[in-house]
Image (cartoon, rainbow, N blue to C red):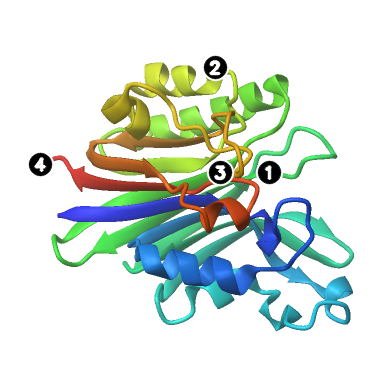
């Protein structure tokens, strides 16, 4: 069975530079892709302060608005909490989520990060898989600490098919090599194309920040969505991958 997944840092629904609130356009673009599972970073759970200044701010609970009727199952990890609201990572799924958890992996007071992990049931093949979504620090020291936490957790799941996606801020590719080596897994783009995908900034991507790691799964297609409308929606480009579970 082919499973279609999308990983995307949506920049809280704003364009690069925070000039326009375009969550509706982001939702429309993601619906066109029609992935089975979405892994989203920088998702607003709530933000009361801007309700009076942005006309369509009723979409502030963004993971519910984005999921709507297309992805009936979702999990949200509240990571950054402040007086006006909170934001974090989200997983939206067409498959039933039977269990999920969110682990705080922040290493400093300026960056609130989390590791969101969900177990889903795929009824068509009567299999369970693990979906993991994260957003790591801007500093190498922080990323090293966070990747160690994630690696130790996923070592316990070595016999279960899983995917680990997100914004790793891994511009120097050190974290990717560590995860591949210690968990003996594939990064989808490197496996299929020989290199990691460039995703940032969206209008002229030169930095490779986002990753798709697979355990007991095989990538059959991996694409950075870089068509003109994607370049205008967020500061990152999304990653689209099709995978198959190993027998």
Calculate the distance from the C-alpha at mark 2 to the C-alpha at mark 3: 16 Å
| Residue located at (46% from left, 42% from top) | 165
Q: Which residue is mark 2?
A: 174
Q: Regarding mark 4 in the picture, which secondary structure is present there?
A: loop
Indicate the position of residue 245 as horizontal and vertical percent values: 19, 45
| Residues packed near mark 2 inside 10 Å, few (<14), some (14 to 19) or many (20 plus) | few
| Residue located at (70% from left, 57% from top) | 15
Give the foreground label among 2 and 3: 2
Q: Do the residues bearing badges 4 and 1 touch, measured as CB atoms within 8 Å? A: no
Q: Which residue is mark 4?
A: 247
Q: Do the residues bearing badges 1 and 3 touch, measured as CB atoms within 8 Å? A: yes
In the rendered view, tell whether residue 139 sits above or below residue 44.
above
| Residue located at (59% from left, 29% from top) | 207
In terms of depth relative to the viewer, which is nearer, 230 or 60? Answer: 230
Quarter of the figure with the N terminus = bottom left
Q: Which residue is mark 1?
A: 113
Q: Earlier in the sequence, mark 1 or mark 3?
A: 1
Which residue in the rendered view is the most extreme toward the left?
247
Q: Earlier in the sequence, mark 4 or mark 1?
A: 1
Q: Earlier in the sequence, mark 4 or mark 2?
A: 2
Q: Which mark is residue 134?
A: 3
Indicate the position of residue 127 as horizontal and vertical percent values: 19, 56
Calculate the distance from the C-alpha at mark 4 to the C-alpha at mark 2: 31 Å
Calculate the distance from the C-alpha at mark 4 to the C-alpha at mark 3: 27 Å
Residue 69, can we see it? Answer: yes
In terms of depth relative to the viewer, which is nearer, 196 or 245? Answer: 196
């Amino acid at each position: 069975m082919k499973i279609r997944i999308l990983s995307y840092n949506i920049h809280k629904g704003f364009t690069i530079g925070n000039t326009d609130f375009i969550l509706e356009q982001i939702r429309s673009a993601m619906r066109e892709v029609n992935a089975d599972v979405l892994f989203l970073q920088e998702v607003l759970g709530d933000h009361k302060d801007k309700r009076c200044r942005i006309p369509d701010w009723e979409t502030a609970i963004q993971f519910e608005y984005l999921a709507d009727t297309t992805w009936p199952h979702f999990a949200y990890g509240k990571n950054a909490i402040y007086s006006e609201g909170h934001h974090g990572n989200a997983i939206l799924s067409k498959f039933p989520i039977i269990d999920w958890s969110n682990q705080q992996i922040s290493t400093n007071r300026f960056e609130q990060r989390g590791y969101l992990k969900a177990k889903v049931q795929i009824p068509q093949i009567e299999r369970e898989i693990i979906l993991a979504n994260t957003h790591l620090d801007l500093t190498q020291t922080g990323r090293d600490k966070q990747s160690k936490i994630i690696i130790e957790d996923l070592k316990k799941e070595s016999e279960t098919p899983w995917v680990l996606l997100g914004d790793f801020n891994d511009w120097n590719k050190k974290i990717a090599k560590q995860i591949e080596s210690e968990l003996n897994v594939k990064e989808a783009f490197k496996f299929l194309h020989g290199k990691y995908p460039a995703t940032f900034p969206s209008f002229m991507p030169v930095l490779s920040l986002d990753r798709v790691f697979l355990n007991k799964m095989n990538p059959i297609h991996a694409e950075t969505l870089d068509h003109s409308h994607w370049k205008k929606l967020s500061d990152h480009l999304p990653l689209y991958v099709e995978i198959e579970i190993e027998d």
